[in-house]
Image (spheres, rainbow, N blue to C red):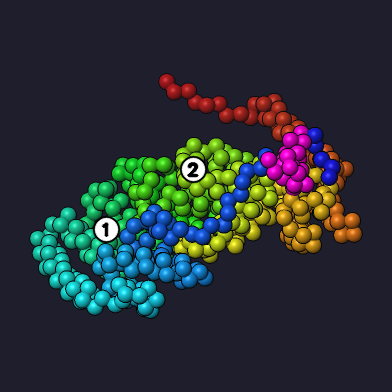
Amino acid sequence: MDADDETLNPMIDEIYTNGGEDTDNNRTNRRAIMSGDQLDIEAYSSLYSGRTKIMRLLFIANKSKNATVQLDALRLAYHEIKKGENTQLFREVVAKIDGRLGEGYEMDLGWCDGVERKMEQKKERLENELNAYRTNLIKESIRMGYNDFGDFYYSHGLLGDAFKSYVRTRDYCTTSKHIIHMCLSTILVSIEMGQFSHVSSYVNKAEQATDALDPIITSKLRCAAGLANLEAKKYKLAARKFLEAGPELGSTYNEVIAAQDVATYGGLCALATFDRAELKSKVIDNSNFRNFLELVPEVRELINDFYSSHYASCLEYLGNLKSNLSLDIHLHDHVETLYDQIRHKALIQYTLPFVSVDLNMMANAFKTTVVGIEKELEALITDNQIQARIDSHNKILYARHADQRNATFQRVLETGREFDRDVRSMLLRSNLIKHDFNIRASRKL
């Protein structure tokens, strides 16, 4: 390889070290790579509460190919559902278990009948109370009545009815705090339903009530907006939103997202879309986001490795995390896309400082074959992301630099045009002054 500029030598040394021979000295200085451990279902589920805890467990049970993981997830979901009032979800879980967990995990008709009987009684009571409030025309009581109905429907898994009830409270909100409460409730149900357009709409509405926003509520709204952008595949916007969440969030929003998720989602989206300067200033040097990254050391290390040009280590971390990230209810659809973007950025940054690159050394740095790295580079060159050409016979990548002679001529012509424009402006001004064609500002007495 030939360096394009002597100032790049420190980064070149780092790349050589990461991709070169695996000497004893290198092995001593390298950080240990995490092993691809099986997901600890119990520890994972303890990060969440409410409906999202159950839905994440069911998602893992559906997606995992490991029978033990499936049954562990179903077992925990079974116990969690019986703490609530969602009989429909309970029947679904029992059907999925299908007797595989033995006694104690069968259909409990007595529990279902009891819950549904109480449900009818509570619904009738709430209807009577709401009708009384509407007759008396007390706005605050009507708002609370609709809100109670929203909570009631949500606890029983009737998300559509819960959404309608929460939205109806909007007409009876009299303070900014009421508006914030309505928006957060609506956002929660919208996320569960997968209606992320509603999430964005109500986040914007909540952000307008500035006098009622505190750091915790602001962080919740940033996380909700981040999820909406992630779902829309607007990864850079998603990264920015997650990075704006403050450490005050803690576990206050675990009915939607855990602090560990903020680090993972924000870190991967930033890695896939930010340039080196942004990665340094907005992620690595971000003291607030560093608190989240400390909760997920693997993500912290892979970001630092990427910035330090230790691409082999970074990609190995990503490879170890991939199976668990594929079981995440929000991230699973985006894992492949984000991983491809991160790898492409690594390839581009690796080649950027050099006039020529040995493909054998590059393949070693990225832990792949020469044929594989050549195909990846061909795709990036075709997409015009790398300005280079490949010598397939000698296995060398040559940077295609701009025509310096032509660029110099273009700069000279542009300078000439600017000079001509400036001279014409000065001549026009001098002629106006010469013929006393100017307007003086009128003085106020």
Residue 420 in sight in this render: no
Q: Is residue 372 above or below residue 431?
A: below
Read off the residue under disc 1: 170
* The N terminus: image quadrant: top right
Region rendered in magenta? 7-28
Disc 2 is placed on an element classified as loop
Instruction: Tell me: 172 left or right of 341.
Output: left
Disc 2 marks a residue whose amino acid type is Glu
Secondary structure predominantly adopted by residues drawn in magenta: helix
Quick check: is 11 in the magenta stretch? yes
Q: Residue 34, percent across and down?
A: 58, 51
Residue 445 in sight in this render: yes
Q: Residue 21, percent across and down?
A: 78, 47
Q: Residue 430, percent across and down?
A: 71, 27
| First along the sequence among labels 1 and 2 | 1
Residue at the image position 38 percent from the left and 42 percent from the top = 248
Instruction: Tell me: 399 left or right of 330.
Output: right
Quick check: is 204 in the magenta stretch? no
Residue at the image position 52 percent from the left and 70 percent from the top = 65
Q: Where is residue 98, by image quadrant? A: bottom left
Callout 1: few (<14), some (14-19), or many (20+) C-alpha neighbours within 10 Å?
some
Q: Where is residue 151, by image quadrant? A: bottom left
Which of the numbered marks, if any, corresponds to residue 294?
Answer: 2
Instruction: Tell me: 383 left or right of 444.
Output: right
Q: Residue 298, percent across and down?
A: 55, 48
